[in-house]
Image: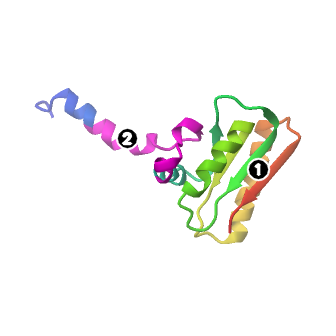
Amino acid sequence: MKNIPLFIIIILVYSCSSNSSDKKSFFLTSDLPVGEYVKESGKKLINQLYGFINIIADSTLIDDTVIIAVHGYESQGYEWISSLNNLAEEYSNTYFYRYDWNICPDILGQNLADSLVTLIKDKSPFNKIIIFSHS
């Protein structure tokens, strides 16, 4: 170990830990471009940890409504990028709910309900929750 230069150790530590730093609880809309980059943006989104991922725009108009998008079976994420970006431009509390589609739907429903209770406690006050999903 004495003969290994310090910068090589730092590079090894950084490369081993970079996967966990790719996991976020939020994205700026600028992090999720559409057009030719939409599939790459989808990969970023769908590879996050399970739970809520906040989508944040530079400026929003409505902050008393919570928007929650729930993906479907085998989603690749890109199907949601344009809609999430547009919603985040209007609503400051826009979320994508990431889950494991290999789990029993009853358990998934309970996990979503439990996560919603926590989100509601953290985000109050608001007037409305809108949940939409696919498949």
Q: Residues within 10 Å of mark 2 (few under 14, many from 20)?
A: few
Mark number, residue 17: 2
**Residue at figure coordinates x 26%, y 38% from the top left:** 12
Q: What amino acid type is highlighted by mark number 1? A: Leu
**Residue at figure coordinates x 68%, y 64% from the top left:** 134
Going from the N terminus, do you reach mark 2 or mark 1 first? 2
Give residue 65's position: percent from left, percent from top.
82, 41
**Residue at figure coordinates x 76%, y 37% from the top left:** 122
The image shows residue 22, relative to residue 100, as above or below, that is: above
Principal SS element in the magenta part? helix
Q: Nearer the viewer, residue 77 or 48?
A: 77
Q: Check if residue 16 falls in the magenta segment.
A: yes
Residue 91 visible in the picture:
no
Q: Nearer the viewer, residue 87 or 94?
A: 87
Name the image quarter holding residue 4: top left
* Secondary structure category for the residue under label 2: helix
Label total for image: 2
The image shows residue 135, relative to residue 86, as above or below, that is: below
Give residue 34's position: percent from left, percent from top.
53, 46
Mark number, residue 10: none
Name the image quarter holding residue 118: top right
Residue 135 as seen in the image, left or right of residue 121: left
Give residue 50's position: percent from left, percent from top.
59, 53
Give residue 11's position: percent from left, percent from top.
26, 34
**Which of the image's four quarters has the C terminus?**
bottom right
Q: Which residues are magenta?
A: 12-39
Q: Residues within 10 Å of mark 1 (few under 14, many from 20)?
A: some
Report the residue marked by disc 1: 116
Q: What amino acid type is highlighted by mark number 2? A: Ser
Residue at the farthest left position:
3
Residue 4 visible in the picture:
yes
The image shows residue 26, relative to residue 106, as above or below, that is: above
